[in-house]
């Protein structure tokens, strides 16, 4: 039996149609997109077409609002660093960043570095027990010193969605820019950036069945931008370096597929996710759902198994042919509980026992059946060996979500 892949928030399989679209751009159409001869023209057109495909998925007003980058991490870095520079040009007093406690490392590591090396103030807004942003604290942090607010569209660990357009409006009212890390949202929720106030948005190819090492930063027309990577005049001087043409073409193809599948596959995936989640919560005692039940991505279920170590559950699931995650792939291997679940103030009995199941359009009902077949026994066996489970008497039972 081939293993079941339920770790799509870490990465997705590149769609075979995407690979097929990419292949001619290695040895056949190999020209440099900047060259003015016939070899380059063909390639320049392909890059332009991919930009249009991405524009359609984002609902952006103009294709030139899209800058191709090496991925979500670069886009996040570029957005924050640019905002600090452009805002300082307008008003030297605007030097603060507002973000959240539950962002991806691609944001958290950058703001920590900026704080340390430039001494700028970073406000990290918290979330409630359901993972919802403390909007009052966000409003209180905004002010005449805010350069940019950066809040993710969807959380990678719990799938919880944030009210980004409302947050962007609030940022603008305070004279600040607004950026969103939408790496987990793009391809999973409908987007219409032309009708929204978001200034900058990050996305990544490999989270939507495109290739790894390619992404984009959307910069709304009229928003000033300074490049992170300086070099040639590629991307209208906003990102130097010869374009990764095969990957750009692949990202364009992935965007078109994502747009085609958004509605039908989104609801099918949601039904699978709900059946998986309901099944686990009903069949396994002392479990809880982490994240906002209604306001979340259709593909993600984060479930805590009380009194257990998520790494042990993950290992046994892996042996039984089910690939999952304990949260963000970047921090697995360490025994530290996830910063997201910590920010949500999960009870101590559940903090170490969370598993993230993340589906994609490639999953089937049989995949869900497999999880429901193997998981209850795994949990029972692990709990039989767990001193924490045996000593739990007197602990109040967790609400059976
Ligand atoms: C995966 C991910 C990133 C990083 O994207 P890369 O293309 O791998 O650099 C950033 N933010 C979120 C929310 C992610 O899930």
Image (cartoon, rainbow, N blue to C red):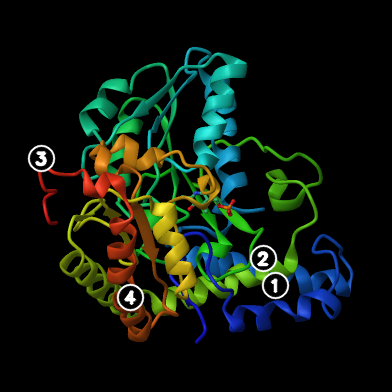
Question: N-terminal of the two: label 2 or label 4?
Answer: 2
Residue at the image position 70 percent from the left and 72 percent from the top: 46
* Distance of label 1 from label 2 (alpha carbons): 9 Å
Q: Which residue is mark 2?
A: 248
Work out whether 322 lies above or below 327.
below
In contact (CB < 8 Å): disc 1 and disc 2: yes
Secondary structure under the numbered disc 1 in the rendered image: helix
Residue at the image position 39 percent from the left and 59 percent from the top: 313
State whether label 2 is within 8 Å of ligand 1. no
Q: Position of residue 330 (x, y in %)?
A: 54, 47
The total of numbered circles placed on residues is 4
Comparing labels 3 and 1, the label whose residue is closer to the camera? 3
Residue 231 or residue 188, whichever sits in front: 188
Mark 1 nearby-residue class (10 Å; few <14, some 14–19, many ≥20): many
* Distance of label 1 from label 4 (alpha carbons): 31 Å
Secondary structure under the numbered disc 3 in the rendered image: loop
Q: Which residue is mark 4?
A: 269
Secondary structure under the numbered disc 2 in the rendered image: helix
């Amino acid at each position: 039996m081939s293993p079941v892949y339920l770790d799509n928030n870490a990465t997705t399989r590149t769609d075979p149609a995407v690979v097929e679209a990419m292949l001619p751009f290695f040895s056949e159409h190999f020209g440099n997109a900047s060259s003015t001869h016939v070899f380059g023209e063909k390639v320049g057109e392909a890059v332009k077409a991919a930009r249009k495909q991405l524009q359609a998925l984002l609902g952006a007003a103009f294709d030139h609002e899209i800058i191709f980058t090496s991925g979500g991490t670069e886009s996040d870095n570029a957005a924050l660093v640019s905002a600090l520079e452009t805002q300082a040009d307008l008003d030297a007093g605007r030097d603060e960043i507002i973000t959240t406690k539950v962002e991806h490392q691609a944001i958290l590591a950058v703001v920590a570095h900026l704080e340390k090396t430039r001494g700028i103030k970073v406000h990290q807004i918290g979330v409630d027990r359901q993972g919802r942003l403390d909007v009052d604290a966000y409003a209180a942090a905004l002010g005449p010193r805010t350069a940019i607010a950066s809040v993710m569209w969807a959380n990678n660990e719990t799938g919880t969605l944030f009210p980004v357009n409302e947050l962007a409006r609030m940022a603008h009212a305070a004279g600040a820019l607004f950026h969103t890390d939408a790496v987990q949202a793009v391809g999973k929720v409908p987007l219409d950036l032309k009708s929204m106030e978001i200034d900058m948005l990050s996305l990544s190819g490999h989270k939507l069945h495109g290739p790894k090492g390619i992404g984009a930063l959307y910069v709304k027309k009229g928003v000033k931008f300074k490049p992170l990577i300086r070099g040639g005049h590629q991307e209208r001087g906003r990102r130097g370096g010869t374009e990764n043409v095969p990957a750009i073409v692949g990202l364009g193809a992935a965007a078109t597929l994502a747009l085609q599948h958004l509605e039908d596959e989104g609801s099918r995936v949601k039904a699978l996710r709900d059946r998986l989640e309901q099944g686990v919560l009903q069949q396994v005692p002392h479990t809880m759902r982490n994240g906002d039940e209604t306001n979340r991505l259709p593909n993600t279920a984060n479930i805590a198994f009380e009194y257990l170590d998520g790494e042990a559950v993950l290992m046994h699931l892996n042996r039984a042919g089910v690939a999952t995650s304990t949260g963000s792939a970047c921090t697995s291997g360490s025994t530290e509980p996830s910063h997201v679940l910590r920010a949500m103030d999960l009870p101590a009995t559940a903090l170490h026992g969370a598993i993230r199941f993340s589906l994609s359009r490639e999953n089937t009902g049989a995949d869900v059946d497999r999880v429901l077949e193997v998981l209850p026994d795994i949990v029972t066996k692990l709990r039989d060996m767990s001193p924490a489970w045996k000593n739990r008497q007197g602990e109040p039972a967790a609400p059976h979500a």
